[in-house]
Amino acid sequence: MSARTASWRRHILQILAASVVAAGLGYFSNRPAHRHLAEDQAVIKLSLRHAGQVLGECHTRTPEELADLPANMRAPMVCPRERSPLLLELRLNDALVLSEILPARGIHNDGRASVYRRLVVPVGRMNVAVRLKDHIESDVFQYESSRTVRIGPAENLVIDFNGDLGDFEFLLAGSLLPDGVPSDQGAALEDPLDDLEARDRKRQDDEEVDETPVGKRFTAAHFDDAHYPVGEEVEADGDYGEQQNLTHGRGA
Amino acid sequence: MLNLLEAGFRRVEAAFNTVFTEAWNPIYQLGALAMLNYWIVAVSGIYLFVFFDTSILGAWSSVEAITREQWYLGGIMRSLHRYASDAMVVLVTLHLAREFALSRFRGPRWFSWVSGIPLLWLLFAAAIGGYWLVWDRHAQYIAVTTSEFIDALPFLGDGLARNFLSASTLSDRFFSFLVFLHIALPLFLLIGIFVHIKRLKLARIHPARGLIYGTMAMLLALSLAKPAVSMGPADLGTTPAVVDLDWFYLNLYPFMESVGMLWVWGFLGALTLMLAAVPWLFPEGREVLHSPAVVNPDNCNGCSWCFQDCPYDAITMIPHQDKPGLRQAMVDPDLCTACGICEGSCPSATPFRRVEELISGIEVPDYPLDALRRQAESAIDGLDREGLVLFGCDHALDVARLQASGVAVVSLPCSGALPPSFADFVARKDKVLGVMISGCHPADCFFRKGSQWSEERLSGERMPHLRTGAGKHKVRTSWAGPHDQRALESELETFRMELSSDGGRAEVS
């Protein structure tokens, strides 16, 4: 083989090698696609940032206590800083899916407690009830709120505690799309229930849904009132809708 | 494990040598190629930033405009930005794997190894942060998942992911912060790279010119054939169900969902610690000499050749301790790899000196010059007939396997550790037809510069030159990797035949 032929052969092999590398770069830069949610799944995001009640009572210092303190620290009244942990509960169709004690932040436990949880749930209509106790030893929940919502595939239901209003805000499909973007998602967001109503009706017609045993596995159909009436007692155990698939994000 | 990995790399290198030649072999220049891609990313990024709208509502639209309305430049720049980033992570991973496989992390090299680990984090952080800016569905998925991932750390709270609850909780200011990060992190990466190569003299940061052109052509062709495009605009009211993931950077994201964030943190933490501990986890191999070079002031004339040749900046020149007005070398033992290249550069390291014990101005205690002379003499004595003496580096081909009738072998820690005067010393012997010096290919020298310096010394481009009364044609180099035994045998045979021919003999005699 002449040197010239060898050189050409080498160049062709170089181009082939570069093509293989380029093909690999091109392909894996956005393929294969990753399915993040199943077609019949939606998301509930529960978020909160709130300070619990102060633990303990203020008390007046005795003259002896005051005398023990440096002169610049003799405040007659002393108040504890530590705040109570919060107790947050979320129920879907009366089934308890999240119950969490949220400690106050800070070295002295005097900061606000916060939480962010993302739950993957089956699509459909459901009653969502959330309540918050801001003193762990209290007998009652100070804040409670519930809504019946219908969540469509891949939609986000955001439940955020608004400290100023002292209530939970429910936000479904709150969207802000760039100007001039033709998006069928945008159109859907204007009335997200329409398509889902039709879809649910079709599913009721098509599917023969088994009787839902209490505390057992759930499917999307179980979140429909027709098959799983709101208010029915549900055993809040790990079987709820395949718990491992229900919760993602922190603490999953 | 190291042996298997090394064998794997050597085979691939051999195949690439056939296709690309040694000088253009990309496997030999992984770090430099990663650097080239860094600059491509930087230049294309600056261009994109000019047209980028730093706001939630404007980001996606501006990237779309760059991609579609000026596809001929902006679109190509965007694709180059994407693909060069992807290429960079591949190159960096291979670079790390190869340095590990070839045991280039021990001794004073620990610094380069360990300082490279934060660069991996910076590279991923910079690249993943860049994806947020496009603010499409892909970006939304990455932003939310990354935020949840960061929030999973118990000491950081739940603050970051709350930014992405809904459109109303996300502000332009946060977006500006992301842009700032996407500029700052690559700059930190650049500073980190500077530290990474700080201890290397003449670090190779530019690949061979042919590879530069080839890489550019490949990325350009890929950008034209498959331009990088966005998914639909981000919509915090919904969750992207299917995402076109960049698997080069986001391969752990599906695991974050399936096994949990803290497990992935645990995995990354353990991997980082394990990588950082590599220099101390793996025992030293046979090839590493322990004792750093020492200076013998009596024989050091302050020429500074060793200072110029040390590939690890381990030598500095200081005022001579005994000779006023002169300088002498000083070795930093923490930086010295005991390669012996300084010994090869020392003008006093000549076997012709009439002293009882041969000591050069600087030498490696585990491989003193006197021992080298004895080895050379013993090799010559061992020649059963007129033949060749082969000086070979321990890190390339195992030259002991080439010991044969008419071929005597002397093993060296590095080909650069052989003073040229030794080649002359041996070549003058009656039984010696010629001297062959072998070692790693100059583009892939275990001690970075040994083969290159050796080549330049023999060709008269670098001090000390080869001066020989025997004839320079009697000294030849042949750079041979671990799998090139046949090639080296063939070169030895060719060399012998040339020297044995009448012309050669006439010149020798």
Image (cartoon, coloured by chain):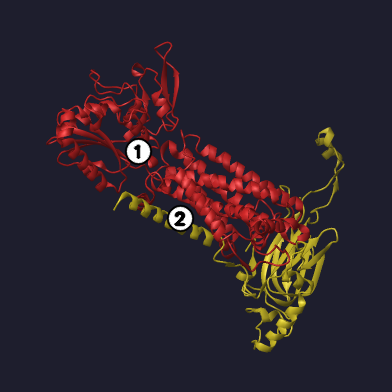
Q: Amino acid at mark 1?
A: Val
Q: Position of residue B296 (x, y in %)?
A: 35, 20
Disc 2 marks which residue? A18
| Cα–Cα span, label 1 and label 2 | 36 Å
Q: Nearer the viewer, residue A51 or B501?
A: B501
**Left or right relative to B274: residue B434:** left
Residue B7 visible in the current orientation: no
Q: Which residue is mark 1?
A: B288
The front one of B217 and B59 is: B217
For the colour yellow, the matching chain is A
- Relative image position of residue B335 (x, y in whole percent): 44, 32
Q: Residue visible at 15% across and 38% down?
A: B406
User: What's the residue at 42%, 29% (across, down)?
Assistant: B333
Secondary element type, mark 1: loop
Please state the chain letter of the residue tagged with numbered disc 2 in the rendered image. Answer: A
Q: Position of residue B185 (x, y in %)?
A: 62, 45
Q: Say few, some or many: other residues with alpha carbon within 10 Å of mark 1 (under 14 / 14 to 19 / 20 or more).
A: some
Observer-side mark, 1 or 2, equals 2
Question: Which amino acid type corresponds to the residue marked 2 in the rendered image?
Answer: Ala
Based on the displayed image, in which of its 4 quarters is residue A229 positioned?
A: bottom right
The chain that appears red in the image is B
Q: Quadrant of the C terminus of chain B?
A: top left
Pinpoint residue B304: horizontal percent, then vertical percent: 41, 22
Residue A164 in the image: above or below residue B354: below
